[in-house]
Image (cartoon, rainbow, N blue to C red):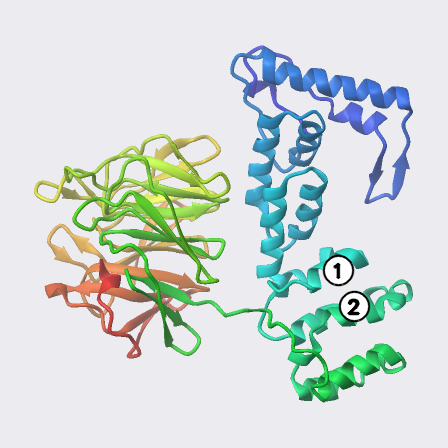
Amino acid sequence: MGRIDSSVLGQGMKTLDISQELKRDHCWVDADKGIRKNVSVRQIHRIKSKMVLFCFFILCVLPCPRITVDSTNAESLLNVANQYQIEPVKMMCVKFIFGQIDSTNCLGISVLADHMNCPELKAAAEEFSYLHFTDVCRLDEFLHLDIAQLTHLLHQDKLTVYCETQVYDAAVHWLKYNISSRQQHIVDVLRCVRLPLVPKTFLSETVKIEPLFQDNPHCFQMITCAMWDLGEVSQPRRKKYDNCIGLFDGNHCYYFDPKDYSWMSINLKLSKRQNTTAVLWNRVGCILGGSHSFHIKHTDFYNILRNRCSRPGPSTPRENMSACAFEGKIFTSGGSEAGGSAVDLFESYDTMTESWQVNTSMLVSRSSHASVEANGLIYVCGGMTGNGVSGRVLRNCEVYDPSTQQWRKLHEMRVARKNHGLVVVDNKIYAVGGEGSTGGLDSVEYYDITINKWHAASRMPWRSLTVKCVAVGDIIFVLAGKGLGAQCLRNVLEYHTKTNRLVYQLNTVDINYINN
């Protein structure tokens, strides 16, 4: 159990740390040294009593308790909070762990959540493992699953793969990792693979000649039935796609594939709105704010399974705000209310609890600005203060630290701009186009986070009034925007950050809504 620093409990109060005593007295296994330490029943009761008194003191005696949850103590705190039903601490730990889910730990978090009776955390970790199965199956956590955990995972319809051969490769990899102890599970593991979905050439050239299965009559029968289409029809898995860029309007979603510059249209029934903002979190597109005759109060969520639902919007409906995501939260900043003036409002939407929270206000009121997350911090750049009649385009930038809930000023941009694109590539924040004090801009600049300074980059081939862009790897794609005369962008523009080079692509789609 990690340390809870006295600085968060009150001045002059002694730090309460029972981690060393737990390690000294409790029964645990040192994974690095393989040493098991034993403990007596009397010691267990003494330690449990200390934990109960400690947590009771934190939650009930202190007037305004603040417990810092981090990677060193989250699991231990969750264990204690679950054992003694201390729900506030349990919820804090769950929220923290929820934001830490990734390919390296999702399987372990699922097991932990099940043991700690945290169904929402378990569901989130499992869904992540399904969506990112092709990454998860290459890591050590997957190879150390027991047979029950493995078969449960491989049986899932929601496994997201390009082809069933990826499930087959993962199954064989697990078997061969420790074949001496897993030989007995060969048939059960092969049953998890939906062989009728495997291409016939792969069955004949790879599966049929695999030494693991050649001498097993049950495996031979399964493979033969699949090759001759004698088995039952198998349910396809969830299809995995490469990186695509989504562009939304009230009736359609257009996907752009950066690999072949192709477009795909999907019919939707999202709320008709303009001057909105969109952000992606955990494969769910969130469309926030905007207006359509009046300010829209709800948020549209669109996920990769083509489901749609609405959730309560920000507490103050507005348009021309900006949004970005970090650790399971969507942070919305600024915008303009019904009166038209920019606001300094800064809110966050917790995707786990589906609730909004008002955070520390920005240093400057702004709308039509842009925001991004980088290294756990929220960067806000440019925009306009005031209103559309007497407003002023901004150069200034500020950054928010979620851990301290404080803002601080940054070095100003070289050019004042609003309605610009803002993306992060290799620890640099790129501001692309937009509208300046005297009209459209063709300038591009980037902010080097390490030295707090803006630098000029290659100019765009046209002046813009609005720009929508996204980064895929080290390439920035400009897919939407309006130029001078409010003409919509008809070309895809690439900016190669490593070579500081702009490339025009003529492949585009006839859509106007994306420029709002």
Q: Amino acid at mark 2?
A: Val
In the rendered image of this protein, does residue 392 appear above or below residue 460?
above
Name the quarter where the C terminus is drawn: bottom left
* Between 188 and 40, the one nearer to me in the picture: 188
| Pointer 1 with pointer 2, Cβ within 8 A | yes
The residue nearer to you, when weighing 307 against 451, is: 307
What residue is shown at x 90% (from left), y 23% (from top)? 41
Quick one: label 2, few (<14), some, or many (20+) residues within 10 Å? many
Label 2, secondary structure: give it.
helix
In the image, taking residue 164 as reference, residue 24 lies left or right, namely right
Q: Position of residue 390 (x, y in %)?
A: 9, 40
Residue on which disc 1 sits: 150
For marks 1 and 2, the one nearer the N-term is 1
> Tag 1: Cα neighbours inside 10 Å, few (<14), some, or many (≥20)?
some
Q: Confirm whether residue 15 shows in the render.
A: no
* 34 relative to 474, above or below: above
Disc 2: which residue: 189
Q: Is the N terminus in the top left, top right, bottom left or bottom right quadrant?
A: top right
